[in-house]
Image (cartoon, rainbow, N blue to C red):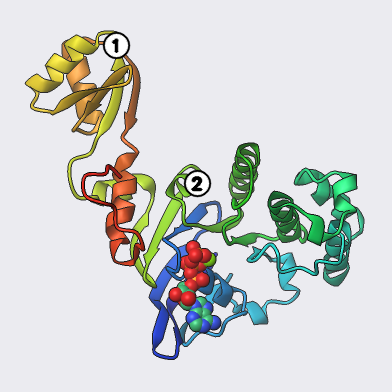
Amino acid sequence: MITVDRLTVSYGAFTAVDDVSFVAQPGRVTGFLGPNGAGKSTTMRVMVGLTPPTSGQVTIGGLRYHDIPNPGRHVGTLLDASAQHVGRTGREILAIAAQTMGLPKTRVDEMLALVGLSDNEAGRRLRNYSLGMKQRLGIAHALLGDPSVLILDEPANGLDPAGIRWMRGLLKGYADRGGTVLLSSHLLHEVEQIADEMILIGHGRIVAQGDRATLLAGASGTPTTLVTSLDNTALGAALTHAGHAVEAAGAGLKVQASPEQVGRAALTAGVVLTDLRSGGAGLEDLFLELTSSTQRDALPNGVPA
Ligand SMILES: Nc1ncnc2c1ncn2[C@@H]1O[C@H](COP(=O)(O)OP(=O)(O)OP(=O)(O)O)[C@@H](O)[C@H]1O
Ligand SMILES: [Mg+2]
């Protein structure tokens, strides 16, 4: 478990992290989401003792990072995938880390296989690695000591779609086995698909937290639902009759109502649904709204988000 307790980090008069508190639980993937400059990396650097807190503290399993004996065996970190020595090969970087942690050499090959780096790639120097290869090596490095806590700063950066799917499966499996995963991203879609819990940060402050459903429930405005059925005309009429605004969207309908309300209208009308989902835009709108004071780029009027 990672516990962030009233953490503040100031650089002179500038407060990068402002009274932040949250918990990342074992068995859960916690997404740390916020726009560029929100304070995600700074918070994560405090977690692993690289940046001193101005006030407050972070503990992992009840201990501060520096007080954890052989921390690599308990906490796996990926902070800056290019922070390694560029003249070393991927295999050397893992071998040195394994030696430091007192792990058998076989662990290095296991991790290279796990992250999909071939023998040939593992023998190249880091300076010749592609962004995605660096990221895979960073994940191998984080997992090397078989830790129970993972702290990953923008782990999906540079991964191709297959790599992102692979990482999602890897981290979900890791959490299912009881591990604690905290991962940051500035991309909602990335986090939404993998995180059980989300912590939204903007301008150094936590602006919302909870699971997807809780966050959406707290969002202002009417929820939207996308629905497709065997008889959209009849369903559309039933929804309009129930007082919900309906418009055509692709092969189905976009409705200003919750999935439950749409389901009820369909039940009443006796229409078979073939697809029903909560409109993803709701969460994106919420994210932009909550972090709007820190958005660099205001959306021009009339341009849909
Ligand atoms: N050593 C430092 N000195 C001064 N300001 C700093 C320092 N480190 C970070 N900051 C500032 O703190 C703020 C938060 O930075 P941080 O790197 O934590 O953001 P982030 O949420 O990780 O953003 P991104 O999505 O771009 O990675 C930024 O305004 C940054 O310029
Ligand atoms: Mg960052």
Report if residue 57 is visible in the image. Answer: no
**Residue lying furthest bottom in this view?**
12
Report if residue 180 is visible in the image. Answer: yes
Question: Toward which corner of the image does residue 126 lie, by quadrant?
Answer: bottom right
Instruction: Tell me the crowding category of disc 1: few under 14, some 14 to 19, or many 20 or more residues within 10 angstroms, Cα based.
Output: some
Looking at the image, residue 238 lies above or below residue 122: above
Q: CA distance from mark 1 to mark 2?
A: 32 Å
Looking at the image, residue 13 lies above or below residue 290: below
Across and down, in percent, residue 166 comes to: 65, 40
Q: Decide if residue 258 is on the left or right side of residue 61.
A: left
Label 1 sits on a secondary structure element that is loop
Q: Which mark is residue 190?
A: 2
Q: Quadrant of the C terminus?
A: top left
Across and down, in percent, residue 38 comes to: 42, 68
Looking at the image, residue 43 lies above or below residue 195: below
Residue type, numbered disc 1: Val
Label 2 sits on a secondary structure element that is helix
N-terminal-most mark, 1 or 2: 2
Across and down, in percent, residue 202 comes to: 36, 66
Q: Quadrant of the N terminus?
A: bottom right
Q: Decide if residue 286 is on the left or right side of residue 60.
A: left
Question: Toward which corner of the image does residue 249 lie, by quadrant?
Answer: top left
Instruction: Tell me the crowding category of disc 2: few under 14, some 14 to 19, or many 20 or more residues within 10 angstroms, Cα based.
Output: some
CB-based contact (under 8 Å), mark 1 and mark 2: no
Residue type, numbered disc 2: Glu
Q: Which mark is residue 272?
A: 1
